[in-house]
């Protein structure tokens, strides 16, 4: 059943930092469903972290720092040369100076805003541009968002604004790439404790609040996100594109002040 679901699909996961990241939950679910995985890492340190994970130790890993000009086209040129084509890309890349994820949004510095939107949003646009060239048979591209793109979440600040831009990019890219039979979607995950989320002030309170109001009486997990990604990357989601898919146990944060 699993092999029938994916039909030997091969694809790229960008931005898995460690076993506690959302991308790890995605990669684990895809591995279980028999997807063939390729990874990128920002640098050699993160590359080694992926290699140290037993189930991924034999996967190909490319170094790609999306903040550097030319890194993304070079990556996809290598992928095209080595594999000919791929079927999907998962973009799990975001960054902001954690010192600016507190206080007031209007205190965001120009330097951090430009750096954060380059890495967290523009990189997705650039990835889609060059991934198209190695998806001659169509495919699926996914990125990760958060409800702070829609509502004010305390201490999410500049990342909320950037995730809103990312979600708008998903819709425009879905329109652009539809003629190539490439679907573009985002998963808006509920709060999950990760290395990245640890930089958000009062995050433990957000987790507690979400759990208390969830219809499922719990927070979303990396496994939940992974299963949703496995579906969206499969042919069973062949008619879904341009969507922001919420996987949050039914919570939908609405700008609560703690």
Image: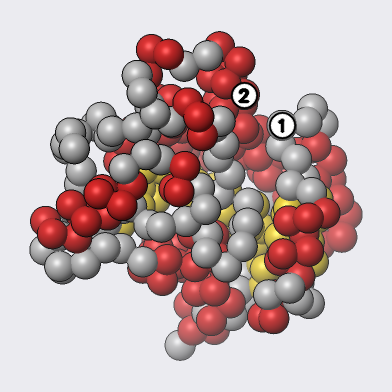
Kindly identify the residue that appears in the image at 41 percent across and 57 percent down: 193
Q: Whole-Å distance between the Cαs marked 2 and 1?
A: 8 Å
Marks 2/1 in contact by CB < 8 Å: the verdict is: yes
Q: Is residue 256 above or below residue 24?
A: above
Q: Position of residue 230 (x, y in %)?
A: 46, 68
Q: Is residue 36 above or below residue 212?
A: below
Q: Is residue 138 visible?
A: no
In the rendered image, the quadrant that contains the N terminus is bottom left
Nearest the viewer among 206 and 113 is 206
Residue 171 picture quarter? top left
> Is residue 205 shown left or right of residue 64?
left
> Is residue 6 shown left or right of residue 236?
right
Earlier along the polypeptide chain: callout 2 or callout 1?
1
Decide: few, some or many residues near mark 2? Use Cα within 10 Å; few <14, some 14-19, many ≥20.
some
Q: Position of residue 243 (x, y in %)?
A: 35, 44
Nearest the viewer among 66 and 89 is 66
Kindly identify the residue that appears in the image at 72 percent across and 64 percent down: 49
Decide: few, some or many residues near mark 1? Use Cα within 10 Å; few <14, some 14-19, many ≥20.
some
Q: Is residue 145 visible?
A: yes
Label total for image: 2
In the rendered image, the quadrant that contains the C terminus is top left
Kindly identify the residue that appears in the image at 30 percent across and 63 percent down: 220
Res. 115 mark: 2
Kindly identify the residue that appears in the image at 47 percent across and 16 percent down: 108
Q: Residue furthest bottom?
A: 1
Q: Secondary structure at mark 1?
A: loop
Res. 67 mark: 1
Residue 84 picture quarter? bottom right
Nearest the viewer among 252 and 255 is 255
Nearest the viewer among 85 and 243 is 243
């Amino acid at each position: 059943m699993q092999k029938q679901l994916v039909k030997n699909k091969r694809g790229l996961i960008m931005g898995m930092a460690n076993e506690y990241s959302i991308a790890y939950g995605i990669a684990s679910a895809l591995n279980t469903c028999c997807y063939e995985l390729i990874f990128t890492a920002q640098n050699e340190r993160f590359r080694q972290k992926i290699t140290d994970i037993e189930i991924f130790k034999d996967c190909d890993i490319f170094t790609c720092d999306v903040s550097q000009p030319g890194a993304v086209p070079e990556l996809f040129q290598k992928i095209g040369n080595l594999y000919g084509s791929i079927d999907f890309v998962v973009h799990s890349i975001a960054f902001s100076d954690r010192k600016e994820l507190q206080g007031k949004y209007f205190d965001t510095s120009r330097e951090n805003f430009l750096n954060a939107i380059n890495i967290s949003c523009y990189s997705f646009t650039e990835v889609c541009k060059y991934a198209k060239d190695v998806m001659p048979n169509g495919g699926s591209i996914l990125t990760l968002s958060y409800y702070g793109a829609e509502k004010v979440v305390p201490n999410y600040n500049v990342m909320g604004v950037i995730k809103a831009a990312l979600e708008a990019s998903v819709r425009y890219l879905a329109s652009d790439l539809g003629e190539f039979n490439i679907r573009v979607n985002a998963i808006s995950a509920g709060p999950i404790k990760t290395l990245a989320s640890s930089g958000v002030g009062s995050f433990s309170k957000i987790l507690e609040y979400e759990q208390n109001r969830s219809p499922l009486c719990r927070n979303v997990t990396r496994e939940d996100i992974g299963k949703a990604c496995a579906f969206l990357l499969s042919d069973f989601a062949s008619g879904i594109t341009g969507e922001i898919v919420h996987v949050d146990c039914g919570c939908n944060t609405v700008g609560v002040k703690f």
